[in-house]
């Protein structure tokens, strides 16, 4: 299907180079990483905790579907000198074909144990 090929080509052509690291293995891919805003946090990326203020920014990752973050524990993503960890991710499929992977990222330096919900 042409639309699938067009989206993959767009990611490969216009995406930024990212490095995905798991343990001692790392590989480069093309992806888009952009700030992710919701209506509730549109005015501020800061939250108050007992230890003071901290950045609660989140980022949207759109990349090629050959990377399934649900199967890569503790993956680190580096792009433009910034490091991120994956909060959640899914592979988007269209007409039974994996089209792209999207993920919500958090800056690695801002990680705290209370950043993630527990099941």
Image (cartoon, rainbow, N blue to C red):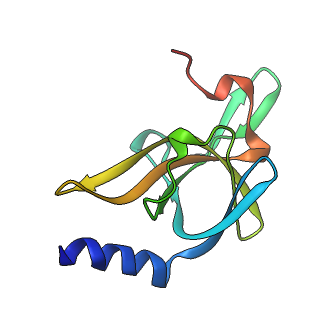
Image point 60% across, 27% down: which residue? 116
Q: Nearer the viewer, residue 31 or 49?
A: 31
Taking the view exactly as shown, the residue that stands out farthest to the top is: 119
User: How far across and down, in percent of the image, does residue 85 sit?
Assistant: 66, 45
> If the image is split into quadrants, where does the N terminus sit?
bottom left
Image point 78% across, 46% down: which residue? 23
Image point 56% across, 17% down: which residue? 118
Image point 47% across, 59% down: which residue? 66
Q: Is residue 106 left or right of residue 3?
A: right
| Residue 64 drawn above or below residue 115 | below
User: How far across and down, in percent of the image, does residue 86 sit?
Assistant: 60, 44
User: How far across and down, in percent of the image, does residue 35 sit?
Assistant: 54, 58
| Residue 42 drawn above or below residue 26 | above
Residue 43 in sight here: no
Quarter where residue 27 is shown:
bottom right
Q: Is residue 111 left or right of residue 101?
A: right
Q: Nearer the viewer, residue 75 or 78?
A: 75
């Amino acid at each position: 299907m042409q639309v699938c090929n067009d989206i993959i080509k767009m990611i490969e052509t216009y995406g930024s180079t990212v490095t995905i690291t798991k343990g001692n293995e790392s590989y480069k891919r093309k992806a888009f990483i952009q700030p992710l805003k919701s209506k509730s946090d549109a005015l501020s990326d800061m939250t108050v905790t007992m230890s003071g203020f901290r950045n609660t920014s989140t980022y949207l990752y759109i990349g090629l579907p050959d990377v399934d973050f649900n199967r890569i524990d503790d993956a680190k993503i580096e792009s433009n000198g910034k490091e991120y960890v994956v909060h959640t991710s899914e592979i988007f499929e269209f007409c039974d074909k994996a089209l792209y992977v999207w993920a919500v990222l958090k800056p690695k330096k801002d990680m705290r144990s209370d950043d993630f919900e527990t099941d």
